[in-house]
Each structure stands twice: as C-alpha cells, then as structure tokens.
Image: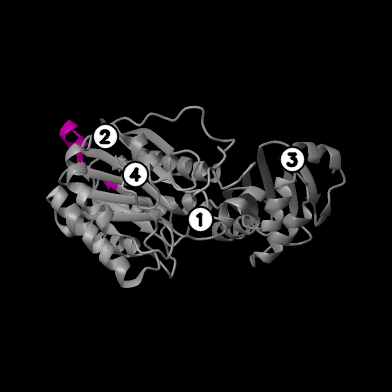
Amino acid sequence: MGKIMTLSPFAPKSLAHLPPIEGVRFATAEAGIRYKNRTDLLVAVMDAGTTAAGVLTQSKTASAPVLACRKHLKKGEARILVVNSGNANAFTGKKGREAVDVTVRHAAAAASCKPHEVFVASTGVIGEPLEAGKFAHLLGKLAEDAVPDAFEDAARAIMTTDTYPKVATRIAHIGDAEVTINGFCKGAGMIAPDMATMLCFIFTDAAIGASALQELVTQHAKTTFNCMTVDGDTSTSDTCLAFATGAAAARGQKPIDKAGSKKLKAFSDALHDLMRDLAIQVAKDGEGLSKFVTFEVGGAKSWAAARKIALACANSPILKAAIAGEDPNWGRVVMAVGKSGEAADRDKLAIWFGTYCVARDGERAQEYDEKTVAAYMKNRDIVVRVDAGVGKASATVWTCDLTHDYISINADYRS
C-alpha cells in the first residue's frame, strides 16, 4: 500500500464526468489516517428523505463498519456517509466498535440527524486500531463545506492500491421524469466479492422506497460484483451502498415502493449496467495485472453452477499465471472445471481461447494450432469460453491475470 503502483494498462485516458445529483454533496480531507499528504477521508451529505440500501460482505470476520451498516440498513434512511482509507478498522475488537461509535456520533451532529441515518465504511490495513480522533473533529466542517460537483474527488479519497478511480454514470427515465445514477468504487486486491466489491457507493435522485432499492441492489450484485474476482480473497470490508435522494419527485416522478413495478424497468436496467461497468473496472485494475480476462461458461445445469465453474477458472493461480505468460495451456482450464465440484461431462467438454476451439468432445480439437492460439494470447483482452456439456445455463465472470507484480505489491503492503 505504501509503494507506488504502476498505472493499469486499462486505465481510461479520461474519466467519465459524473454530474451533480440533487440532494448529495461531498467533501474530502487529508486526515493522516495512515499516510501524510494523502486524501483519505470522504464525507457525503444527503438531504432529508434519502433512502438507503446495500449489500455487505458475508465474511465471518467482517469489520466494525460493516456491522454498523448492517444494523442501520434495517431503517433504510440516510443523511451522511463517512468513509476513510488507510485503515480497514477490521479485527480491531472493542476499539473498532468504539471508533465507529465516535464517528457515528460526530457525523450525526454534523448532519443534524439520527445515528441510524449515518453510514460508515473503512478500507486499508486489517488489524490496526483506527484512531477516530484523527478525523471525527473534521466532520462538522466537512459537512458544512460539502459541494455537489465532487464525485471524482470522492472516488480518489477512498483509493488504496487502486491506480485510478472507478466512476460511472447513467441516465434513466421513470415515467416521464429523467433521473441520474452515479457510482464510484475502489478495489484492486483482496477481491473475490461475496456480496459486492470492496467499497462501492451509488447515488441517484430517483424517488424509490428503501425496500425496492434494496431488492434491486441485491438482485444486480449477483450478476455484477459477485461475478468479478482478482485473487479469490473476500475482504472483511466489502460494502456496496446505494442512496436515493428522491429529488426527482419535485420534477414529477411518482415515488415507487415496489421493485417489480414496470415503471422501474428502465431504472433497473441502468442500475445493473452501472454496477456491471464498475465491476469490470475493478477487474481491469487488479494488482499487477497485464491482461483482462473474461470466462464465459455455458452448457451448465444452472446459472449458479456455471458461475461456480467460471470462478474456479478465474481464481486458479496456475491458470492465471499461464495467461500472464501468454501460454495457451488449456489443460489448466480442464483442471479448473474439474475442481469446481459442479457437473461437467468430461467427454463433451469444449474449450475456446477467443474464437479458437482448443478442445472438443473431451480431447484436443483437431484444428488446434499452437502458434495461432499463442499469438492470440498476446492480446491484452483474453476471452476463455467453456461448454460443460451437461445443460443450457451460462454465466460470465471477469478477472485478470496473475503476475510477479501482484506478489511485489502484497509482499510489503503494510510497510
């Protein structure tokens, strides 16, 4: 975390501009939580009436902020979000809970709201006590100074080993009213989400009830963030929160409380597309990567089975290392499919690297040409397709390769 990261080869030449969303304001600060001269504190202040939804890590060693968010989400109301980088406030026992309590108390005072309307998130080193006193006193002034047009600053404040901020925006219509959805997230290592990505925050001016928003976020996380992995390691801090200010109601949008409403279809599609975009951006910034890899698995018994097979491939160190070395070693794909535990017919299994079939009917394809496929492996974007031969279900998972730089970055993460 302390070392300078090489910019991802997939970093965009320019970031998407996220327009202001009515009812949301941001402020950031250098609080010196772990490093000096680094923006490491984010405050987002939301208007009264904002609804909240989210999905959180299923890790059995979840952080103190995750537990607080889980509790506050039961009310579905939000007024202020406080996020720090540099320290995950995870595996910190009583001190971790106390740090959250201090943060919530100061944030509630800063936003003139109730404690359950405060959401907190932390990312960084695990096991080090978080000194809330370093930043809690700053929250009042930050809330006062917060401005609407600061999404990029907000995204940068929560970065750790990320080499660029991940941002996305979408426009949708609910009835005749136009609404905006903005989102930003962070994550580059310790990424194998079991709910969402490491930290992701989504804001919209749509007027949507908390339960409807919750249903949409939960549903879409399954096929976006939960279908992305960098290294197979699920974080203690995974948090994806969505906030709807309801400002669009003043422009004629009728509030919606049911996720199944036909009027929410376009919004739901836009939200899913935004979450998918952010998930792919995380995979494209995987620590030390040189290639972005997509695993497409078909011919499975169910979507869940196809996803599990795809994740077995995407999380295989030996397969990811082969891809980094531009080795068309399809035998390692066979291995990963077999170890997944899901049904696959060995004698019907088929594998493609890009458009090139390398294995068919349980053996090497007759048309397989080593030089041709090896040339394909030199591309930055690699697609590996598998047909398990037992059904019709399919799933897609996004990941990256595994290089020496990943080891270098994580060998001295705490130093």
What residue is disc 1 on?
415
- For the question of whether residue 75 can be seen, the reply is no
Q: Identify the secondary structure beneath mark 3.
A: loop
What residue is disc 3 on?
377
Q: Amino acid at mark 2?
A: Ile
- For the question of whether residue 109 can be seen, the reply is yes
- Residue at 68% over, 65% down: 339
What residue is disc 2 on?
21
Residue 202, disc: 4
Mark earlier in primary sequence (1, 3) = 3
- Residue at 66% over, 43% down: 383
Mark earlier in primary sequence (1, 2) = 2
Query: Where is residue 187 shown, x and y percent of the image?
Result: 47, 49
- Where does the magenta region start and end? 243-254
What's the distance in space between the residues labelled 2 and 4, CA to CA? 11 Å
Judging depth in this view, the residue of 45 and 130 nearest the camera is: 130
User: Label 1 neighbourhood size at 10 Å, few (<14), some (14-19), many (20+)?
Assistant: few
User: Label 4 neighbourhood size at 10 Å, few (<14), some (14-19), many (20+)?
Assistant: many
Is residue 371 part of the magenta span, yes or no? no
Asked if marks 3 and 2 touch (Cβ < 8 Å), the reply is no
